[in-house]
Amino acid sequence: METTTLGKTGIEVSRLGLGLAEIRDLSGRDGTDQAARVLNGALDSGINFLDTAECYGNSEELIGKTVAHRRDEYALATKCGHSDGLGGPSWTASTVRESIDRSLRRLKTDRVDIIQLHSCELEVLKRGEVTEELVK
């Protein structure tokens, strides 16, 4: 699989990545098995860029259950900032921190390579607290 450097990050990724919003609908043992086939098949084929989000249902959990043991083989991107299941408002510093921590637990990893704000409005960015939390 041909690779390239992702922007100015220095992260070497396959030119073809795997967007994982659609695995969110998989559930139960059969769903986990299907996710394992998709994710391991992609990695075995040379795809090394996985993109998910904390708001993509159980996508992060499925990644954690099926390929966490292969973590050094892929670059991992996720998104943060939604308050779904956290009990507070979206787009605050504390919600960003909590959603990142939750993602790390779900993904069964101690790191993500790229963290993104997902659908954040410009007014939120202008306040600065969310971007300051991302830098931390």
Image (cartoon, grey):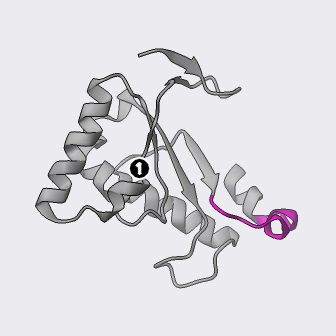
Circle 1 crowding by C-alpha within 10 Å: few under 14, some 14–19, many from 20? many
- Which one is in front, 48 or 131? 48
Secondary element at tag 1: loop
**Which residue matches tag 1?**
20
Whether residue 102 sits left or right of residue 32 in the image: it is right
Instruction: Tell me where residue 42 appears, x and y as whole percent.
Output: 31, 32
| Residue drawn at 35 percent across, 35 percent down | 71
Whether residue 43 sits left or right of residue 31 in the image: it is right
Number of marks drawn? 1
| Residue drawn at 51 percent across, 24 percent down | 15
Q: Quadrant of the N terminus?
A: top left
- Residue 122 belongs to the span the image colors magenta: yes
- The answer to whether residue 66 is visible is yes
- Residue 101 belongs to the span the image colors magenta: no
Q: Which residues are magenta?
A: 118-129
- The answer to whether residue 60 is visible is no
Whether residue 90 sits left or right of residue 53 in the image: it is right
Q: Residue furthest bottom?
A: 87
Instruction: Tell me where residue 36 appears, x and y as whole percent.
Output: 21, 44
- Which one is in front, 39 or 136? 39
| Residue drawn at 35 percent across, 22 percent down | 46
Instruction: Tell me where residue 82 appears, x and y as whole percent.
Output: 58, 70
Instruction: Tell me where residue 133 appears, x and y as whole percent.
Output: 70, 59
Q: Residue furthest left?
A: 29
Residue type at mark 1: give it. Leu
| Residue drawn at 76 percent across, 57 percent down | 132
Q: Residue furthest top?
A: 2
**Residue 126 position (above or below residue 69):** below
